[in-house]
Amino acid sequence: MKRRRPTQVIPGRNHTAFSLVELLVVVAVIAILAGLLLPALTTAKATAQAARCLNNHKQLQLAWLLYAGDHDDQLPPNGDMLPGLARNDRPFWWAQGVMNYRDDHPDNTNTSLLLDERWAQLGNYTKDAGLYRCPSDRSVSRVGGQIRPRVRSVSMNIHVGRIVDCFVITARRVGPDKVAQIPNPAMQFVFVDEHPDSIGGTAFWIVPGEGRESKLLSYPSALHRGGAVLSFADGHVEAHRWLDSRTRPPVKGQNWLGETDSPENSDVRWLHQRTFFPEE
């Protein structure tokens, strides 16, 4: 009778295998931990993006103030624009470019319209195209068959440094000429993140009608937990969450947001309280 050779045991090695039940328990525990951790990671990411956006606005507002300091306190120019008519022969724009979702639209990816001082009066003070785009903005444009992020998310309050009739010889400023002439700089917002489906030119449009006459001409962004980041003429920045659902429409990736009646909208009232409306 042939004798069976004894199994060789290697010292220090555990030969006990996991059962199917034990493996399923481990998988279940991992799934539970992932479910607990993912919301925390999502919150941490959103917080980090909001912090970056606040810093971007702080730098933009500092550039705005530095420009005024170098130009006898004069407000950076916020000229009215017409689509597709970027100009480098007249210094009426803090930045230029029209954002949209059209394929191969050059403004969507042209950082020269933000940084080159021939086109953008604040470009020499910012020098970083990343300051103009909210970290939470996922809007893109197709250029040459490739998907690329759009370069700008921010707009400037139309009632700050506004210049009208920019394309004729009679261009003129509406409202205060200098920072010192703004009635309450701490309550005058300058830059704001604009809704990706609302942003077009470089100006954020609001009208003074309140109560039943309230309207949304430009929509603020709601990418930071239902809110946006704004900067103010005194240099401070803040994040603000919008309360009315009409101010927070979903992002569809198309230019569908235009002038809309929004009676009794508390968010419109909040913006009005932080805007000086000069008489034309």
Image: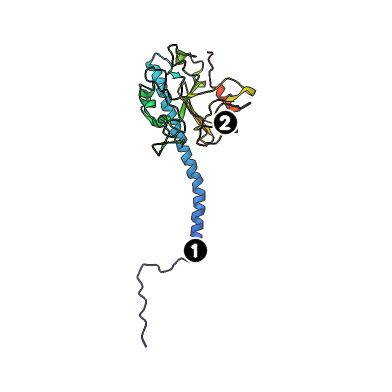
Badge 1: few (under 14), some or many (20 or more) residues near its Cα, within 10 Å? Answer: few
Along the viewing direction, whichever of 17 and 156 lies nearer the viewer: 156
Residue depicted at 43% across the width and 30% down the height: 152
Q: Disc 2 marks which residue?
A: 247
Q: In x, y percent, where is residue 91?
A: 39, 17
Residue 22's tag is 1
Q: Relative to 245, does residue 279 appear above or below in the rendering?
A: above
Q: How many labels does the image show?
A: 2
Along the viewing direction, whichever of 133 and 4 lies nearer the viewer: 133
Q: In x, y percent, where is residue 174?
A: 49, 14
Q: Relative to 174, does residue 25 appear above or below in the rendering?
A: below
Q: Which residue lies furthest to the top in this view?
A: 170
SS assignment at label 2? helix
Q: Which residue lies furthest to the right in this view?
A: 212
Q: Relative to 149, does residue 18 appear above or below in the rendering?
A: below
Which residue type carries mark 2? Thr
Q: How far apart are marks 2 and 1 (CA)?
A: 51 Å
Q: In x, y percent, where is residue 185?
A: 49, 19
| Earlier residue among tags 2 and 1 | 1
Residue depicted at 50% across the width and 56% down the height: 29
Along the viewing direction, whichever of 116 and 142 lies nearer the viewer: 142
Tell us which disc is closer to us: 2 or 1: 2
Q: In x, y percent, where is residue 1?
A: 37, 88
Which residue type carries mark 1? Glu
Asked if residue 237 lies left or right of residue 4, the reply is: right
Q: Relative to 155, does residue 72 appear above or below in the rendering?
A: above
Q: In which quarter of the image is residue 105?
A: top left
SS assignment at label 1? helix
Badge 2: few (under 14), some or many (20 or more) residues near its Cα, within 10 Å? Answer: many
